[in-house]
Image (cartoon, helix red, strand yellow):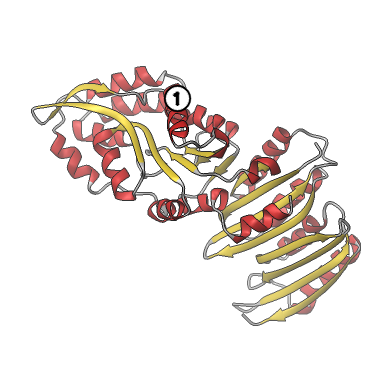
Amino acid sequence: MAKNSFIVVAAVGKDRPGLIAGLSSAVASINGNIEDMDEVVLRNSVFVMSMVVDISLTKKNFNEVKGILATKGQRLGLKVLVDRVDL
Amino acid sequence: MDKKIVVTIVGRDRPGIVAGITTALANLNANIVKARASSLSDLFLMMLVIDVKEVKVPLSGLLDKLKSEGEKVGVGVSVETGDNYKKEKRLIVLDMDDTVVDTEVINELAKMAGVEKEVKAITAAAMEGKMEFKEALTKRVELLKGLPVKKIYEFRSRIPIVPGALEVISELKKTGFVTVLMTGSFDIVANYVGKKLGFDYVFANKLMVKNGKLTGEAKGKVLSPESKLELLKKIAKKEDIPLEECAAVGDGANDLLIIKNAGLGIGFNPKKLIKKEADAFVNVKDLKVLLAFVGGGKLREDIKSRL
């Protein structure tokens, strides 16, 4: 990807241990760098997470990145939204 | 374990930090109930509130696991119980050599006195805990006999300060911290460094001087891990601050007891022994990262509200 390529990732689902680990491992596997991340568990059960990821170093194109994260999310039982951002 | 703990991660930013740390936590069945992470220039900072209800290992085991994972991905780590985190720190004590200044002062003095090799060997043994600190000090100071004080003045005026030192001391003082420089190194240098950086207290060993030259004798109380702890207790009592609200920062064997007994013990690019015993360790040479561990502000309030 070009220099200064960022994506924003949002994920929602039922909370359990390993969700941040799963998504951040998927990000690391494509050499993405998490610039900013927030996560909170609402009402002791709902997992809500957002992150901004620098994907300048990845060899994949945007649609491939989006696919990898969505597939990983599905496996974790999460709804995952991915979009490009201009910073 | 039934309570929440707070994990702070800080280090040079690179891909894989979040994945490494959170995978280690997931493997222990620890659930992250609040996470806040951001990169600030080339540093990466992450705070996690973790529910350890389902974790089968004791807190010390979790700390060991996170420390070794931190080492693997190249970041510093601190682990505190929620109760401990809620006790905000109000006093910080820092070691000088290799913590506030980027050098081992006695080795530099030895270089000037032409006894570098002999002194370095003793220093290394003392910092690794292989020789008693008091004995090591006496032996090394003897070797410095005859060194002109003028040369030490010249050296201290160009002593390398660790990046972030000035900022962290001024920032902590602004928020009401009592700041203490406590070193087994020497007054001629420590008083200068303490004044330059704005420390409230400076404790160091006194080098005896006669006719402008070192006599080869030292006088002082900062001789051992035990006396460092005694001094810390004394200041804490004087300032009316309980030990649980004190933070101690250092790198070597001489800091062991203050690091073990303070509310938060932080190893700063520490030797093995300290890394093993500390609640936290840092592996970048930038003292600003201490603000992540003991600083206040909005983020701390937010984290406290989740405990």
Residue B156 seen in render: yes
Q: Quadrant of residue B254?
A: top left
Up/down of B298 relative to B30, above or below: below
Considering depth in this image, is A1 or B227 the residue closer to the camera? B227
Q: Is residue A80 left or right of residue B202?
A: right
Q: Quadrant of residue A41?
A: bottom right
| Within-10-Å neighbours for mark 1: few <14, some 14–19, many 20+ | some
Q: Is residue B41 left or right of residue A10?
A: left
Q: What residue is rendered at 36% in x and 43% in y?
A: B200
Up/down of A22 relative to B271, above or below: below
Considering depth in this image, is B20 or B171 the residue closer to the camera? B171
Q: What residue is rendered at 85% in x and 41% in y?
A: B54
- Across and down, in percent, residue A75 comes to 90, 62
- Across and down, in percent, residue B139 comes to 29, 19
- Across and down, in percent, residue A3 comes to 59, 77
Check disc 1 and report the residue beneath it: B230
Q: Quadrant of the N terminus of chain B?
A: top right
